[in-house]
Image (cartoon, helix red, strand yellow):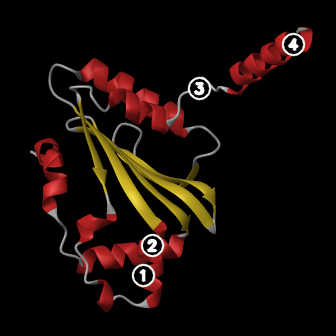
Amino acid sequence: MKINILTSALLALLTLVSCKSEPTLQKYFVTNTENKDFIAIDVSPSILNLEKTTLTEEQTKALNSFDKMNILAFKANATNGAKFEEERAKVKAILKDPKYQELIKFGSGKEGGAISFVGTDENIEEFVVFANRKETGFAVVRVLGKDMNPNNIIMLMGILQKSKVNMDQLKPLQQLLK
Protein backbone atom coordinates (compact mmCIF):
# COMPACT_ATOMS: atom_id res chain seq x y z
CA MET A 1 0.00 0.00 0.00
CA LYS A 2 2.82 2.39 0.92
CA ILE A 3 4.56 1.60 -2.38
CA ASN A 4 1.40 2.47 -4.37
CA ILE A 5 1.01 5.80 -2.57
CA LEU A 6 4.70 6.57 -2.98
CA THR A 7 4.59 5.64 -6.69
CA SER A 8 1.48 7.76 -7.26
CA ALA A 9 3.01 10.73 -5.47
CA LEU A 10 6.22 10.37 -7.49
CA LEU A 11 4.30 10.20 -10.78
CA ALA A 12 2.25 13.27 -9.85
CA LEU A 13 5.41 15.17 -8.93
CA LEU A 14 7.13 14.20 -12.18
CA THR A 15 4.07 15.29 -14.16
CA LEU A 16 4.01 18.68 -12.45
CA VAL A 17 7.75 19.19 -12.88
CA SER A 18 7.72 18.18 -16.55
CA CYS A 19 4.94 20.64 -17.46
CA LYS A 20 6.49 23.84 -18.70
CA SER A 21 4.52 26.96 -18.00
CA GLU A 22 6.58 29.37 -20.09
CA PRO A 23 4.90 30.76 -23.20
CA THR A 24 5.50 29.14 -26.59
CA LEU A 25 4.40 30.11 -30.07
CA GLN A 26 2.13 27.09 -30.21
CA LYS A 27 0.40 28.13 -26.98
CA TYR A 28 0.18 31.71 -28.26
CA PHE A 29 -1.49 30.53 -31.47
CA VAL A 30 -3.95 28.29 -29.59
CA THR A 31 -4.80 31.06 -27.11
CA ASN A 32 -5.48 33.67 -29.79
CA THR A 33 -7.07 31.62 -32.57
CA GLU A 34 -10.59 32.54 -31.43
CA ASN A 35 -9.69 36.10 -30.35
CA LYS A 36 -11.61 38.72 -32.38
CA ASP A 37 -8.49 40.88 -32.74
CA PHE A 38 -6.70 38.09 -34.61
CA ILE A 39 -7.03 36.32 -37.91
CA ALA A 40 -5.86 32.70 -37.83
CA ILE A 41 -5.30 30.53 -40.89
CA ASP A 42 -3.90 27.04 -41.30
CA VAL A 43 -2.53 26.36 -44.78
CA SER A 44 -1.83 22.89 -46.12
CA PRO A 45 0.44 21.98 -49.06
CA SER A 46 -2.70 21.39 -51.14
CA ILE A 47 -3.03 25.18 -51.50
CA LEU A 48 -0.28 25.05 -54.12
CA ASN A 49 -2.39 23.16 -56.70
CA LEU A 50 0.70 21.64 -58.28
CA GLU A 51 0.95 19.15 -61.10
CA LYS A 52 3.26 16.83 -59.16
CA THR A 53 4.39 15.00 -62.29
CA THR A 54 6.17 18.17 -63.45
CA LEU A 55 8.28 18.45 -60.29
CA THR A 56 11.90 17.39 -60.17
CA GLU A 57 13.07 14.92 -57.54
CA GLU A 58 14.55 17.78 -55.45
CA GLN A 59 11.32 19.78 -55.70
CA THR A 60 9.28 16.76 -54.64
CA LYS A 61 11.59 16.22 -51.66
CA ALA A 62 11.27 19.89 -50.66
CA LEU A 63 7.48 19.77 -50.99
CA ASN A 64 7.31 16.58 -48.92
CA SER A 65 9.30 18.22 -46.11
CA PHE A 66 6.56 20.85 -45.72
CA ASP A 67 3.64 19.80 -43.49
CA LYS A 68 1.64 22.96 -42.94
CA MET A 69 1.77 26.66 -42.34
CA ASN A 70 0.01 28.48 -39.50
CA ILE A 71 -0.63 32.20 -39.83
CA LEU A 72 -1.76 34.41 -36.97
CA ALA A 73 -2.27 38.10 -37.72
CA PHE A 74 -3.26 40.98 -35.46
CA LYS A 75 -5.00 43.83 -37.25
CA ALA A 76 -4.12 47.19 -35.68
CA ASN A 77 -6.55 50.09 -35.79
CA ALA A 78 -7.06 53.47 -34.13
CA THR A 79 -8.68 51.94 -31.03
CA ASN A 80 -6.41 49.00 -30.20
CA GLY A 81 -2.93 50.56 -30.16
CA ALA A 82 -2.21 49.52 -26.57
CA LYS A 83 -3.37 45.94 -27.27
CA PHE A 84 -1.18 45.88 -30.39
CA GLU A 85 1.89 46.90 -28.38
CA GLU A 86 1.09 44.33 -25.66
CA GLU A 87 0.61 41.46 -28.11
CA ARG A 88 3.67 42.40 -30.18
CA ALA A 89 5.76 42.41 -26.98
CA LYS A 90 4.47 38.91 -26.12
CA VAL A 91 5.53 37.54 -29.51
CA LYS A 92 8.94 39.22 -29.30
CA ALA A 93 9.46 37.73 -25.82
CA ILE A 94 8.60 34.24 -27.08
CA LEU A 95 10.99 34.60 -30.02
CA LYS A 96 13.83 35.52 -27.63
CA ASP A 97 13.82 31.92 -26.40
CA PRO A 98 17.18 30.37 -27.41
CA LYS A 99 15.43 27.59 -29.32
CA TYR A 100 14.46 30.19 -31.96
CA GLN A 101 17.63 30.83 -33.93
CA GLU A 102 17.39 34.11 -35.80
CA LEU A 103 18.39 33.93 -39.46
CA ILE A 104 17.73 37.49 -40.52
CA LYS A 105 16.27 40.66 -39.12
CA PHE A 106 14.93 43.48 -41.27
CA GLY A 107 13.55 46.94 -40.62
CA SER A 108 13.63 48.70 -37.27
CA GLY A 109 12.25 47.73 -33.86
CA LYS A 110 8.93 49.50 -34.52
CA GLU A 111 8.49 48.18 -38.06
CA GLY A 112 10.07 45.24 -39.76
CA GLY A 113 10.49 41.66 -38.81
CA ALA A 114 12.64 38.62 -38.48
CA ILE A 115 12.98 35.09 -39.76
CA SER A 116 13.94 32.42 -37.24
CA PHE A 117 14.04 28.65 -37.15
CA VAL A 118 13.85 25.79 -34.67
CA GLY A 119 16.13 22.81 -35.12
CA THR A 120 19.52 22.37 -36.71
CA ASP A 121 20.82 23.60 -40.06
CA GLU A 122 20.09 20.24 -41.68
CA ASN A 123 16.94 19.29 -39.76
CA ILE A 124 14.70 22.31 -39.37
CA GLU A 125 11.38 21.61 -37.66
CA GLU A 126 9.90 25.07 -37.92
CA PHE A 127 10.53 28.37 -39.71
CA VAL A 128 9.01 31.45 -38.09
CA VAL A 129 8.42 34.73 -39.89
CA PHE A 130 7.42 37.67 -37.70
CA ALA A 131 6.55 40.94 -39.43
CA ASN A 132 5.00 44.03 -37.88
CA ARG A 133 3.96 47.53 -38.81
CA LYS A 134 2.37 49.92 -36.35
CA GLU A 135 -0.27 51.14 -38.83
CA THR A 136 -1.47 47.70 -39.97
CA GLY A 137 -0.57 45.18 -37.26
CA PHE A 138 1.62 42.12 -37.19
CA ALA A 139 1.69 38.58 -38.47
CA VAL A 140 3.42 35.46 -37.26
CA VAL A 141 3.87 32.68 -39.81
CA ARG A 142 4.97 29.23 -38.70
CA VAL A 143 6.14 26.89 -41.47
CA LEU A 144 6.14 23.40 -39.99
CA GLY A 145 7.73 20.33 -41.49
CA LYS A 146 10.13 17.50 -41.08
CA ASP A 147 13.74 17.35 -42.21
CA MET A 148 13.50 20.81 -43.75
CA ASN A 149 16.68 22.67 -44.58
CA PRO A 150 17.47 26.06 -46.12
CA ASN A 151 17.73 24.49 -49.59
CA ASN A 152 14.22 23.07 -49.23
CA ILE A 153 12.87 26.49 -48.31
CA ILE A 154 14.54 28.08 -51.33
CA MET A 155 13.17 25.27 -53.49
CA LEU A 156 9.67 25.83 -52.02
CA MET A 157 9.88 29.52 -52.92
CA GLY A 158 10.54 28.51 -56.54
CA ILE A 159 7.66 26.03 -56.46
CA LEU A 160 5.36 28.76 -55.08
CA GLN A 161 6.11 30.95 -58.09
CA LYS A 162 5.03 28.15 -60.45
CA SER A 163 1.97 27.10 -58.47
CA LYS A 164 -1.65 27.98 -58.98
CA VAL A 165 -2.32 28.98 -55.37
CA ASN A 166 -5.84 28.21 -54.13
CA MET A 167 -6.74 31.68 -52.80
CA ASP A 168 -9.85 30.41 -50.95
CA GLN A 169 -7.65 29.33 -48.04
CA LEU A 170 -6.19 32.82 -47.81
CA LYS A 171 -9.43 34.87 -47.92
CA PRO A 172 -9.32 35.78 -44.21
CA LEU A 173 -5.98 37.52 -44.79
CA GLN A 174 -7.51 39.81 -47.38
CA GLN A 175 -9.29 41.78 -44.67
CA LEU A 176 -5.94 42.43 -42.96
CA LEU A 177 -4.39 43.69 -46.18
CA LYS A 178 -7.21 46.19 -46.88
Q: State the image coordinates of residue 40 (x, y, percent, origin top left).
A: 27, 40
Give the distance between the C-alpha atoms of the residues marked 3 and 1, in whole angstroms. 37 Å
Q: Position of residue 123 (x, y in %)?
A: 62, 65
Q: Nearer the viewer, mark 3 or mark 4?
A: 4
Q: CA distance from mark 4 to mark 1?
A: 53 Å
Q: Is mark 4 in CB contact (under 8 Å) with mark 1?
A: no
- What's under tag 1, amino acid-wise? Thr
Choose between 101 and 27: the one closer to the eye: 27
- Disc 2 target residue: 64
Q: Give x and y (percent) for residue 136.
A: 20, 38
**Which of the two labelled residues, at mark 3 and mark 4, occupies the earlier sequence position?**
4
| Residue for badge 4 | 6
User: Residue placed farthest to the front in the image?
Assistant: 1
Image quadrant in which the C terminus is located: top left
Q: Residues within 10 Å of mark 4 (few under 14, many from 20)?
A: few
Marks 3 and 1, the one that precedes in the sequence: 3
Give the answer, above or below, for where 122 lies relative to 159.
above
Q: Is residue 104 visible?
A: no
Determine whether 17 is above or below 95 in the image: above
Q: Name the kind of residue labelled 4 in the image.
A: Leu
Q: Which label is found at residue 60?
A: 1
* Distance Cα–Cα, label 3 vs label 2: 32 Å
Kindly identify which residue carries mark 3.
22
- Decide which of tag 3 and tag 2 comes sooner along the chain: 3
Above-or-below relation of 59 to 103: below
Residue 9 is left or right of residue 71, and the answer is right
| Residue lying at 87% horizontally and 13% vertically, measured from the top left | 6
For the residues labelled 2 and 1, say whether their Cβ atoms are less than 8 Å apart: yes
